[in-house]
Every structure is written in C-alpha cells, then in structure tokens.
Image: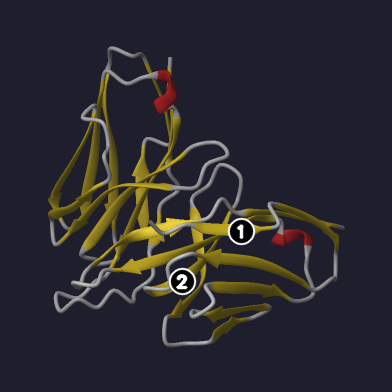
Amino acid sequence: ETGVTQTPRHLVMGMTNKKSLKCEQHLGHNAMYWYKQSAKKPLELMFVYNFKEQTENNSVPSRFSPECPNSSHLFLHLHTLQPEDSALYLCASSQDSEGGTYNSPLHFGNGTRLTVT
Amino acid sequence: KQEVTQIPAALSVPEGENLVLNCSFTDSAIYNLQWFRQDPGKGLTSLLLIQSSQREQTSGRLNASLDKSSGRSTLYIAASQPGDSATYLCAVRNSYSGGGADGLTFGKGTHLIIQP
C-alpha cells in the first residue's frame, strides 16, 4: 500500500473512446500531480494541483483534461487519444505549505498502463 | 530549462559490491533532490530526499550526497544485493526566483542489475 492509489492498473482504449484515470491519496496531502512515463524518456510532468487549484499545465494537448474535485482525488479524462499517448501514467502527491515551502517528498502511485489502439 | 542526466544508463555488478550512481543537473536553483527506485511495471518508491541546504542523507545501506553548486548528486549503495535490482531515478524540485515551485524534473534513470 503506497498511500496513493491509481485505478485502473491497465487500460486499453480505441482512439475514439472516452475514459478516465483515477487517483486517490490517503496521506492528507494538499498537492497532486500527473506524470507521463514513456519508454526511453524521462518522466514528464503534465499537471500540478496545489490546494485544488491547477498551477501548472506543461503544454499538454487538450485531449487530456485533469479534474481535482478535492484534495484527495485527482482524475485525468481522456478523449480521442493517439497511439503515441500509450504510456504509464503516474499520479503523485506531496504536502506543500501555503507559505511557499516545497521541501516535502513526492509520493507516487503504481500507475495506469495505457494502451491506445 | 532544467535538465537532469544520470550516468551510467545501465549497470550490472556481482552481489556484495559497493556501487555509485551519478546524477547531474544544469540549474542549481532547486529546493531539493530526491532519489527513487522503480521496479518493472510499478510506480516509484522514494528512497532519499536531500534538501538544498544539506550535503547528504543516509538510510540503511543507501547514502546520497548533494553538491548543489556543481549540480551533482551521487547515490551510494553498500553491499549490494539481488533485491536491489531496479531502475534508480534522480529528480530535482526546481525553485522560481519569484517564489513557488513545480513538480520534479527527472533523469532517465540507471537500470541496475545485481548478479547473485
């Protein structure tokens, strides 16, 4: 049990489908992140939420849409994906202070392995 | 833009050896540096976190050092075991001159195999 739970573990979807990835953290953290891990590339930061507000969007295509309804839950809504979007999608959380202290470690879930056919 | 490089990309050593994994980063304006372990098909497990004001951190057989001014970190693994086989990732948390931070910037990792 990592404290960060992602579902589903595996997902296969067609290019015209709509699906959602879910992340839940049980650590009482106030910041959550989506990362993409593709073969032979470093983990890429996609979205950051601090205190439920999106603070970063690293030029991610609009076919990826994040949602953070509360500080414990994070979703990634997917629609009309491309085969090159196939990757491991990792969720993470951390505890950051409102005063601007960013010294806490990130905790990761086990990821969702996405295959787009 | 921050870039993180890890050397070597892969390493295979006999059980019992001590080994060093290297990480370098281009921008020294960081809050901290974190080392992770990733097993095949799994997420990341945090091993050690070094704050920018610290020089090293230790946990069991692991010791991580940080030289922020030169943009370097090392992860030392003592008395390696087959269970240490995994991919080891280095990541830095960048700071902004106006305050604030984003997520971590990662290297590509070192794939480590410990031979029984």
To which chain does the residue with label 2 belong? B
The answer to whether residue B112 is visible is yes
Question: Are there few (<14), some (14-19), or many (20+) residues within 10 Å of tag 1?
Answer: many
Give the answer, above or below, for where B92 lies relative to B66: above
**Residue sitting nearer the eye, A113 or A79:** A79
Lower position in the chain sequence, tag 2 or tag 1: 1
Displayed quadrant of residue A7: top left
Residue depicted at 39% across the width and 70% down the height: A105
To which chain does the residue with label 1 belong? B
Q: In this figure, which residue is indicated by the disc labeled 2?
A: B33
Residue A107 x, y percent position in the rendering = 39, 62
What distance separates the C-alpha of mark 2 from that of mark 1?
13 Å
In the rendered structure, the answer to whether residue B18 lies left or right of residue A37 reads: right
Residue B78 x, y percent position in the rendering = 75, 76
Q: Secondary structure at mark 1?
A: strand
Give the answer, above or below, for where B62 lies relative to B85: below
Q: Looking at the rendering, in which quadrant would you find the N terminus of chain A?
A: bottom left
Q: What amino acid is found at the position of numbered circle 1 in the picture?
A: Gln
Q: Nearer the viewer, mark 2 or mark 1?
A: 1
Q: In this figure, which residue is indicated by the disc labeled 1?
A: B6
The answer to whether residue A1 is visible is no
In the rendered structure, the answer to whether residue A72 lies left or right of residue B63 reads: left
Displayed quadrant of residue B15: bottom right
**Which mark is drawn over residue A12?**
none
Residue depicted at 37% across the width and 35% down the height: A8
Give the answer, above or below, for where B77 lies relative to B43: below
Residue depicted at 42% across the width and 19% down the height: A83
Q: Secondary structure at mark 2?
A: strand
Q: What amino acid is found at the position of numbered circle 2 in the picture?
A: Leu
Residue A63 x, y percent position in the rendering = 24, 26
Q: Looking at the rendering, in which quadrant would you find the C terminus of chain A?
A: top left
In the rendered structure, the answer to whether residue A13 lies left or right of residue B23 reads: left
